[in-house]
Image (spheres, rainbow, N blue to C red):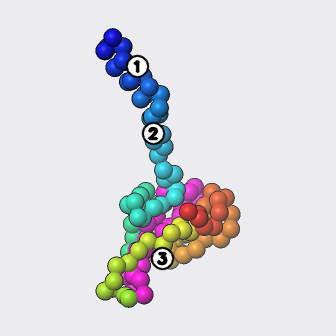
Amino acid sequence: MIKTIITAAALAAALTFPAAASADPDPHVPNGAADWCPGGKHPGYGGQKYCLGAPFADGTFYAQTWSFGPGGPWNPGHWMGDPGCSQWIEGSIQGAGSGACGGGPQWIHR
């Protein structure tokens, strides 16, 4: 009798709490706050740094920017929320034109 009750309780718990889905994040969309930078991290100018997504076939990529807040280097900085479609131009990261980043949007809004 007790074995039946334990088995029934275990079965009920298994049916009530399904396993959580574990999808891998998109390697093209970086998330600096989660340290998800498949394209690497790169320093910028004036205290900025970048978290890059994996590049597309045309060499463009989504980039998320980190910078100091209004208090400058004495206050903690933060990652900007929306990665933008970018490209390397003469050694610096700059915005890419429309149709880049695999034909995706210019900004990934979270």
Farthest residue, direction top: 1
Residue 98, located in which quarter of the rendered image? Answer: bottom right
Question: Front-most of 83 and 42?
Answer: 83
Q: Residue at x 60, y 61 (%)?
A: 101
Question: Gap in Å between the C-alphas at discs 2 and 3?
Answer: 40 Å
Q: Which residue is mark 1?
A: 8
Magenta stretch in the rendered image: 46-70
Q: Earlier in the sequence, mark 1 or mark 2?
A: 1
> Amino acid under label 3?
Ser
**Tag in front: 3 or 1:** 1
Count of marks overlaid on the render? 3
Q: Quadrant of the C terminus?
A: bottom right
Report whether residue 24 is seen: yes
> Reading the chain from its start, which is encountered first: label 3 or label 1?
1
Per the image, label 3 sits on a secondary structure element best described as strand
Check residue 92 in the rendering and tell me which mark sits there, or answer none: 3
| Residue, far front | 1
Determine crowd level at label 3: few under 14, some 14-19, many 20+ residues with C-alpha closer than 10 A.
Answer: few
- Against 6, residue 87 (above or below) is below
* Quarter occupied by residue 8: top left
Nearer to us of marks 1 and 2 is 1
Instruction: Tell me which label, 2 or 3, sits earlier in the chain.
Output: 2
| Residue at mark 1 to residue at mark 2: CA–CA distance | 22 Å
Cβ atoms under marks 3 and 1 closer than 8 Å? no
**Residue assigned mark 2:** 20
